[in-house]
Image (cartoon, rainbow, N blue to C red):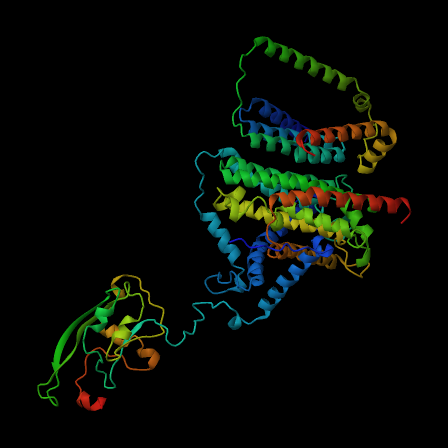
Amino acid sequence: MGVVVKKVELGWLDRTYVWPVLKGMGITFNHFIKQLFTPTSKRYTIQYPDMKKEMPTGYRGLHELKRFEDGAIKCVACFMCAEACPARCISIEAEEFSDLNFTQGFEEKRPKVFKIDMLRCIYCGMCEEACPKDAIWLRNDYEVAAYDRLSMQFGKWDLMNTYAEADGKARISEDPTPSVPRRVLAM
Amino acid sequence: MFLVFALITLLGALGMLLQRNIIVAGLCMVAAFFGVAGLFVLLANPVAAALQIIVYTGAILVLVLFVIMMLNSHEEEPAETPHPIQRWLSVALSLALGVGAVKLVLASRGVQQLAVQGAALPRGTTLEGVGAVLFAGHLLGFEVAGLMLLAAMVGAVALTKRNL
Amino acid sequence: MDTLASLLHTSPALAWMVVKVVIVFSAVMLLASVWTWVERRGSAMIQDRIGPNRAALFGRIRIIGLAQLLADGIKFFFKEDLEPHDVNKRLFWLAPFLAFVPAMLGFAVIPFGRDFVSGGHVYHLSVLDPGNGMGMLYPMAIGGLAVYGVLVAAWSSNNKWAILGGMRASAAMVSYEIGMSLAVVSIFMTTGGYDPAQIIAAQGSQPWHWNVVPQFLGFIVFFTCVFAETNRLPFDFAEGESEIVAGFNTEYGSMKFSLLALAEYAHMMTASALVVTLFFGGWQVPFVAHPGVMLSVLSFLVKLLFFAWVFVWIRWTLPRFRYDQMMHLGWKAMLPLSMVNLVVHAWLMSHGR
């Protein structure tokens, strides 16, 4: 589709070319001075290793496997996330466990192995959507990098501890034996 | 100092004649012009040296090289039928010219004055001096040269721009 | 100076000459290399960016990124010296020097400070003493030689883009030289001399007597032409990322490229020194009739750096001209304007101002 472009008629001052150049130089000089006297923290550029960007809420960064207050994993190994994952990066092995004190032989399910291949993950957040227990969250950490491929395979304990420092929680490396039945807690 | 500049000039000229690559030959010519400019300085005529560099190396040779590069002929084409007579004729002619030039220089007044002990050294020529000579002593020649250049310019424009 | 000369068993004149050469060339080199950083930092600031600020000495002393110069130098020095296939080897090697040497040489006649008398000798603060007979013709002559660096670099690299860039750059330089020379000639005329020392002395210490004020037109023409001569941005036809890759230095790498780049900045320094000398009173300090030597040098340096900064400033303000626009401007605007300037001043002089 043709568009009629109006040709701008220049005045004699603009045709000399000197005055427009001076105007342009004024604009650039304004920017220069402004940028020169803006403190580093207020410039547009975020100088990455020294300064980090505040991620908005809802940002889909590194995963966390949530835990109960006593440190037990919330995940019930229902495989919904693994099914929902478009990149097929989650692999789960389930195990049964029983809390002999309270449930008296009532068997519960939890992941024995919960692995996310961070090299494959596309941070789409489908696992978070699919989870019936809100056990997996994608949160605001975006610095996921390592020197080798093996350390990008995040296991169950890695995933549970990803935000331990940020939230001020203790790092855990084994399932606790719950003292109170979890159904009671949930109610 | 004279020897250095003379060597630069001669080597440049020789290189220009012997180089097969035409661009390198042009650059050799630049070197020769530089040598000549240095000789001008030694002759207490820095204005001529500066003009030599401005006009010859700065403008004319640049244009020559420009055209050569535009036509992009890398190698010199061999002559179609070499005539031995041509070669001998050229050698004889250049010998005659060289001998004549040397005789002319040796017979000139300046050289004879140099032989006189205690003669005043020539004072440096300045731009004012050149201008005064051009516009006072040689005004007619200057104007004629200017007219010729103007005519040449008009001719060049008329030749290249068909539809004015 | 005398003690230094006696220590070195030379005459004071020779020792002073050597000192001057060392001072001038190291200063120009240093300024040129600093200006590569200023260009990058300044352009960043103009575009609301930050620019190179992370290079640090020993990984610690950052000095607002000035160590970038060292980092660049070291990097260029240790890069592999590639020589593409089918280049003309001798000319390919010669070209960076052909570009660099004229850029440095042009500075030689420019007085960067007042003369001073010490121990019965008059010391001139310019590499070639005034009264050498060359005067301002010398930088003009040397400036004309800068074409060869571009031309030879372009031709020897055996690359289409390089040759296109070299051709159009050399055409631009040759055609703008005429307007520039005419603008300078009108200054020769009003000064009544062509020696830089004379030109500076004639301008005096009052800023409204400097040549910019009576010859504003000449200043505009000269400054514009200087941009074309140094191949700086509104007219940098040697390069052109959007059209011909990097132009004449497409095939260059490592130290050879660094020399070509440095030559551009050295040329810029020389050009701004010329502008200062011709139009802004050289080392004259505004409103100070007889400044001290150091003050005059400082004044010259401040003016020089200001104009070098204007080069950077304009580069990041204006887009590149189209080739035909540039030729149009050069032949149909700059040349007539400088002729008008010349004729007007000749008329004014013949009618006793």
> Of A51 and B143, which appears nearest the observer?
B143
Residue B137 horizontal/vertical position (percent): 87, 29
In the displayed image of the protein, which residue is found farthest to the right?
A: C352
Image quarter of residue C286: bottom right
Residue C230 horizontal/vertical position (percent): 63, 46
Residue C350 horizontal/vertical position (percent): 89, 44
Up the image or down, B23 lies above or below C170; here it is: above
Q: Is residue A86 left or right of residue A29?
A: left
Query: Can the viewer see residue C317?
Result: yes
In the displayed image of the protein, which residue is found farthest to the left?
A: A105
> Of C229 and B146, which appears nearest the observer?
B146
> Of A2 and C160, which appears nearest the observer?
A2
> Of A144 and B113, which appears nearest the observer?
A144
Up the image or down, C187 lies above or below C294; here it is: above
Query: Can the viewer see residue C19?
Result: no
Q: Is residue B83 left or right of residue A146?
A: right
Q: Residue at x 57, y 71 (%)?
A: A38
